[in-house]
Image: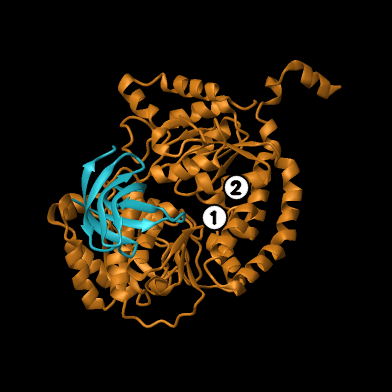
Chain colours: A cyan, B orange
Amino acid sequence: MANIMIRRDAKGALSFYLPKRDLEDTIVSIEFDQPDKWGGAIRLNNGGAYYIEPLTSPPSLPISLRAKRLDGAE
Amino acid sequence: MSHLTREESEALIAEVLDVYPDKAKKDRAKHLAVNDQSVEQSKKCITSNRKSLPGVMTIRGCAYAGSRGVVWGPIKDMIHISHGPVGCGQYSRAGRRNYYVGATGVNTFAEMNFTSDFQEKDIVFGGDKKLAKLIEEIEGLFPLHKGISVQSECPIGLIGDDIEAVSKKSAAAIEKPVIPVRCEGFRGVSQSLGHHIANDAIRDWVLDKAEAKAFETTPYDVTIIGDYNIGGDAWSSRILLEEMGLRVIAQWSGDGTLAEMENTPKAKLNLLHCYRSMNYISRHMEEKYGIPWMEYNFFGPTKIEESLRKIAAFFDESIQQKCEQVIARYKAEYEAVIAKYKPRLQGKRVMLYVGGLRPRHVIGAYEDLGMEVVGTGYEFAHNDDYDRTIKEMGNATLLYDDVTGYEFEEFVKKVKPDLIGSGIKEKYIFQKMGIPFRQMHSWDYSGPYHGYDGFAIFARDMDMTLNNPCWNKLVPPWKKPAESSAAAAA
C-alpha cells in the first residue's frame, strides 16, 4: 500500500502522483467513475496499474488516497 | 558543421558508449537518446532519476545540496545550520548568488555559514549537546534571526542523532521555530530528493504551525515559487506581475522570509517556476488549501508573453487588460534587443546541460535570438520533465540524462556546438577546447535572466561570449599555417 495523490492537470485529465517514488503520470482509465461509485483499478499511461478502494461519490480533487499496486511498470 | 541526422545522432551515441564495459554500456544506453517529438512518453526513450554508475564522472549533487543549497538556503531571515563536518557548509556558502536585501549578519544571514563543525568526539559521543549549545549561541549572537533550520549532513544520519528532539527543546527555549531537516547527503540518487525532503519539512514545520496566523488578503494575491533570485531573477519577474495588478505576497525562496512562507497558504494562485524543486509543496497547498498552481516560464519574450496571458486567465478582466498593456509596453524594448543581437547570433547552435528547469525553459529564449538548441540534458530530472522537454526540442537532437564527463566531452567534439551552457565544473574544460561557454547555474556571475529586463542581459551575455575576439586567438602565431602568416606580413 502506498500513499498517492490524484489531481486534475492543466488539460483536465486525471493525473496520478506517487510521492514516495516521485512518479507522476496521467491516468488513462479508471474502473468506476459514476455518481455513486468512484475508484477501483486505475491504469497509468506508463503501463502501471493501481487499485484504490472505491469511494461512494466522486471526490473533490486533488485528493490523497491509499493505493495498492496491481502491476508496476518499472 | 551541419545538423546531425537521426542516424548520425544514433551512431554518435553508439560510438560514445563503445568504450564502456558491457554492463555499464547497457545502463548508460538507457540515459542517452535522440529526440523524437512524436513520442508522448519519455519513458520509452530515456530513463531518468536513477543512481549514477560508480566510476563515471557524474555532475550531480547530493540531498544536502538540494535542501541547504537550493530550497532553504536563500530564506534570508533564518539561520541554516550545516549540522556536521565543516566542509559541506563552507564550500557551498554563497556560491549560488541568491540575492537579497538586508544587512548580512544583523537581520539576514543567507550568505553566512553556520556549522556545528563535527570532530571525532562528536561522531563517537553524538552531537546533540553541541547542537543545543550552538542554537543557544546563535540566539545570543544574532538575536534578530526569525528561526533556525538544522540541515543534516551525512554523519548525522549515520550516527543516529536525534535532531528532532533537540530542535523541539531549543525551539521552546528560544521561542522561535527550530526546524530539523533530514537531508543527509546519502539519501536518494541526486539533489532531487533533497528538494523533496526540504519541501516536506516546510509543510510539517512551517505551514502546519502557521495556520492560525492572521493575514489580510486581496483577490489578487499570488506567490512566486521556485525562483531563487539568482542574480536578481525573482525581482525582474516580480515587477512584471506587479505591473499586471497582482500582489506578490511571497517569494520562495530567493529573497524570501519565514513570514512570507507562512503567508503562502493565503494566496489565490501559486506560480511555480522551478517545477522540479517545489512542485511538492504546491501539490500540498492545492490539496489542503485549494490553491491552484501553474508552471510558468519567464525566459525570452515569446515564453514570457505566453506565461503572462496564462497567469492573467486565472483572474478577472481588469488583470487581463493590464496584462496586454504590460506586454505592449515592453514590446519596443525587447524588439530592440532582438534587432541588435539576432543578426550576430542567428543560426548558432547551443548545447545545454543544467539542473531543474533550465534545460527546457531557456530553449525559448535562445530561439527568440535565432539560435538553436541541439542537445540538452538534466542532472536530476524525472520522467515528467523529459515528457515536457521532448516537445520543446527539435527532432533528432540529443537528450542526455545524468551525462558523464566523458560522454559530454565526446558529444561536444562531434556535434561542435557554437556555445555550451552548463556548470562551473564543465566550464574550463570546454573553454580550453576553444568553445564559448556560459555558466548557466549562476548565470556566469551576471543576471538576472528572467523577465523582459533579464532577456536584454541574456542576449548581451550570449553575444559577449560567442563573438568574443579571444576565440580565434587560440592558436599561437608560430603554430598558424605558414601562408596566413605570410599574408599577414605582406
Residue B203 at x, y percent in the picture: 31, 65
Relative to A30, is B308 on the left or the right?
Answer: right
SS at mark 2 in the image: helix
Residue type (three-letter) at the residue carrying disc 2? Gly
Relative to B253, is A43 on the left or the right?
Answer: left
Label 1 resides on the chain identified as: B
- Name the residue rendered at 41%, 81% in the picture: B215
Could you classify mark 1 by the number of other residues whose Cα lies within 10 Å: few (under 14), some (14-19), or many (20 or more)?
A: many
The reply to whether callout 2 and callout 1 are in contact (CB within 8 Å) is: yes
Residue type (three-letter) at the residue carrying disc 1? Asn
Residue B398 at x, y percent in the picture: 51, 32
The reply to whether residue B140 is visible in this rendering is no
SS at mark 1 in the image: loop
The image quarter in which residue B196 lies = bottom left
User: On the image, numbered disc 2 is attached to which residue?
Assistant: B364
Q: Which is nearer the eye, A30 or B349? A: A30
User: On the image, numbered disc 1 is attached to which residue?
Assistant: B297
Which residue ends up furthest to the left in the rendered image?
Answer: B125
The image quarter in which residue A46 lies = top left
Q: Which is nearer the eye, A18 or B256? A: A18
**Could you tell me which quadrant the C terminus of chain A lies in?**
top left
Q: Is residue B113 above or below residue B21?
A: below
